[in-house]
Image (tube, rainbow, N blue to C red):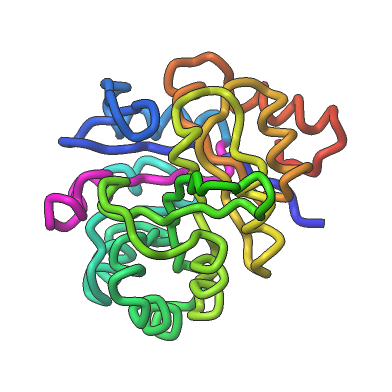
Amino acid sequence: MLAKRIIPCLDIKEGRVVKGIKFLGLRDAGDPIEVAKIYDKQQADELVFLDITASFENRKTLIDLVEKIATNIYMPFTVGGGIRDIQDIRDLLNAGADKVSINTAAVKYPELVNQASAKFGSQCIVVAIDAKKLQAPGSKLQAPKWQVFINGGRTPTELEAVNWAKEAARLGAGEILLTSMDYDGTKDGYDLALTKAVSEAVNIPVIASGGAGNLEHFYEVLVNARADAALAASIFHYAEYSLKQVKEFLRDKGVVIRL
């Protein structure tokens, strides 16, 4: 059985780590290089860096900052934000990223996922999905559905999250980074229904994101919702829990985890 992963996330705006609630009300959480060093020392399984305004501002991600972080850490490093073409992916991999996370461009140009996985290998191509639950009339009698958003959660699309995850996997994505916009930053727990629906629909790893507030939340999403990894930000940035605490808790509950 593969070990479950615990992944801190650096949401970057104007060169600083930030965190908000439901993609709004962003507040400063520190210098990204120093924060990355802390997580490396705490033996995080991986680190995710998301330049959250790059796509909306129609610019590339912060290559210089990516390079500086990459030279200071010794764990797998995923970078996303502002990726538009194969050259952008090549630049980030050359800057030290191990994987790239594609969201807006994957929706607008699905062939990019196929081209990128063919050129660089599916193991380094992550498709990020930001999803919000659709509240349709009479939905209590129907299976829930989640709408996909792009441009850092600003722009709704006509895509449904579970169907888009399946298509992304078919196109060659090696992993899905799944963020619940409804639960993001709330600390109320992950969206278990969304995570389980996507995890059961695809045969590639799913990283659950959005809502971690206590130790039990990690267990619920990894075991009950079948996520392969759990991403979190606020509870680590503000030292409410350490990575060691989370991993030891999961180990004691019988979850296979790297310590």
Q: Say which of 153 and 33 sits in front.
A: 153
Q: Count the numbered circles shown.
A: 0
User: Looking at the image, is 74 positioned above or below residue 198?
Assistant: above
Q: Position of residue 71 (x, y in %)?
A: 33, 47
* Res 26 quadrant in image: top left
Residue at image point 12% right, 56% down: 59
User: Looking at the image, is 188 positioned above or below residue 191?
Assistant: above
- Left or right of residue 140: residue 174: left
- Left or right of residue 74: residue 82: left
- Left or right of residue 220: residue 108: left
Q: Say which of 144 and 39 sits in front.
A: 144
Q: Position of residue 176 (x, y in %)?
A: 53, 60
In the picture, the quarter occupied by the C terminus is: top right
Residue at image point 35% right, 48% down: 70
Q: Position of residue 135 (x, y in %)?
A: 50, 44
Q: Position of residue 149 (x, y in %)?
A: 35, 53
Residue at image point 40% right, 32% down: 37
Residue 71: within the magenta? no
In the picture, the quarter occupied by the N terminus is: bottom right
Residue at image point 49% right, 36% down: 8
Residue 61: within the magenta? yes
Q: Which residues are magenta?
A: 44-67
- Left or right of residue 77: residue 51: left
Q: Kindly tell me whether residue 17 is visible in this rendering.
A: yes
Q: Kindly tell me whether residue 67 is visible in this rendering.
A: no
Residue closest to the far front:
138
